Amino acid sequence: MAETIKDLINGNVSWVNNTLKHNPNFFNKLATGQSPQFLWIGCSDSRVPATEITNALPGSIFVQRNIANMVVHTDSNLLSVVNYAVKVLKVKHIIVCGHYGCGGVQAAMSNENFGFLDNWLMHIKDVYRLHEKELDEIKDEKKKLDRYVELNIQEQVTNLAKVSFIQQEWNNGEFPHIHGWVYSLKDGLIKDLGVSVNNNDALEQVYQYNEK
């Protein structure tokens, strides 16, 4: 594991040399452009890198990460990434991937004061409010946190479906498909939560936009 800035630079050189050994034209091809099929909205946690845990090559996954993999409709950073992904790159799949043991979700589940971070955690707390009855019935704290993580992912999938320009894309075809996944730090495996959306049918009518 890298411990210094120099370790990162040296690691880069080693990675380049090893990559060229197996594929001499890799970087020449990569430099011509990108055409990823996937947009990954994940947690900023350093233990959950999108390409590594899916064994995918650079250029295959467009990535946006923030604390607890949130889709906030006033987050211009996230919306810009999503807009570019669906309008320009024409990605076919958007994956919202959280992970068990998420520190952001755990912080939101508590009554601790985290200063400036509380402004972001408020969006995660809103998820608890929506599912308060189910979560309050879970007495085991670890199981409650795991379920909270899953529910948060499901809500962020729904939040993506509410975005107007994604609904515009659906008016023109079946893509993008939105998926909800959760990653386990304990065994390294991804669990598909069975949430896959490619239309606005399940949304309350107030969130559905008319075709132009």
Image: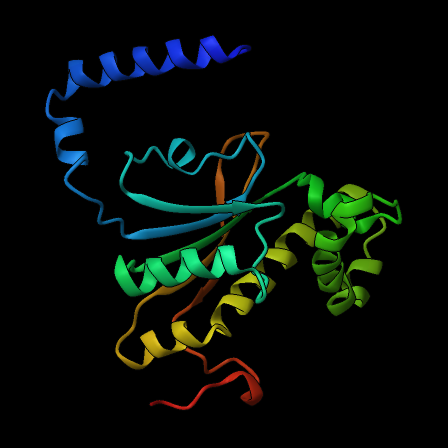
Q: Nearer the viewer, residue 14 or 137?
A: 14
The number of callouts visible is 0
Residue 125 spot, x, y in % from top left: 76, 58
Residue 158 spot, x, y in % from top left: 54, 69
- Judged left or right of residue 152, residue 172 is left
Q: Residue at left 53%, top 80%?
A: 203
Quadrant the C terminus occupies:
bottom left
Q: Residue at left 30%, top 65%?
A: 87
Residue 142 spot, x, y in % from top left: 76, 41
Is 43 placed above or below 17 here? below
Residue 145 spot, x, y in % from top left: 74, 47
Is 211 placed above or below 141 here? below
Which corner quadrant of the image does residue 179 belong to? bottom left
Is 172 placed above or below 94 here? below
Task: Say whether residue 1 is visible.
Answer: no
Q: Residue at left 31%, top 82%?
A: 171
Q: Residue at left 58%, top 32%?
A: 185
Which corner quadrant of the image does residue 154 belong to? bottom right
Q: Nearer the viewer, residue 43 or 141?
A: 43
Task: Say whether residue 210 is visible.
Answer: yes
